[in-house]
Amino acid sequence: MTLVDTNVLLDILTDDPNWADWSLRQMDRAATRGIIVINDIVYAEVSVRFPTIEACDAGLRILGVTILATPKAALFHAGKIYQRYRAAGGTRTGVLSDFFIGAHATVADLALLTRDARRYGFYFPTIDLITP
């Protein structure tokens, strides 16, 4: 299974001129290796692009995405990693969702398709990252 980060899905959904082709190619490659999943955090972030739940679900179905609930162990791990980030002087408050996603990939041993190699690679060094 491959867990897909929000930025990759938004590249495709918004037809980003710089990243849509790369993201779509990577999604296709991931599909040949197994199931493509997102978690509830990614779902929430992507949902802002859709007017209704039904439209969001339909869009994700077209992309071949399955929703996988975030395990409690991953939620706990995310909190601990975020705590480490803040203790090291991290000041950005909008990064907690990345820690949920990274912890989910770590705990469930999932590959992570993302364009954010730096943060995931630093805080979650055991993840199999698929990045540009």
Image (cartoon, rainbow, N blue to C red):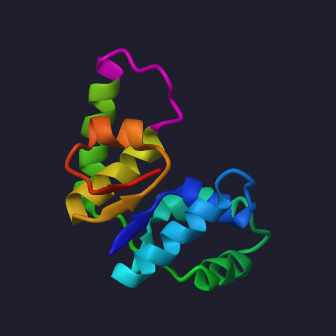
The answer to whether residue 34 is visible is no
x, y percent for residue 100: 38, 50
Q: Is residue 29 left or right of residue 15?
A: left
The answer to whether residue 118 is visible is yes
* The residue stretch that appears in magenta: 86-95
At x 26% / y 60%, what residue is drawn? 72
The quadrant in which the N terminus is found is bottom left
x, y percent for residue 126: 19, 49
Q: Is residue 74 left or right of residue 3?
A: left
State yes or no: residue 111 in magenta.
Answer: no
Counting labels gives 0
Q: Quadrant of residue 107?
A: bottom left
At x 44% / y 40%, what residue is drawn? 96
Q: Nearer the viewer, residue 125 or 70?
A: 125
Q: Residue furthest right?
A: 51
Q: Is residue 44 left or right of residue 125?
A: right
Q: Is residue 73 left or right of residue 44?
A: left
Q: Nearer the viewer, residue 33 or 69?
A: 33
**122 over 25 or under it: above or below:** above
At x 31% / y 58%, what residue is drawn? 104
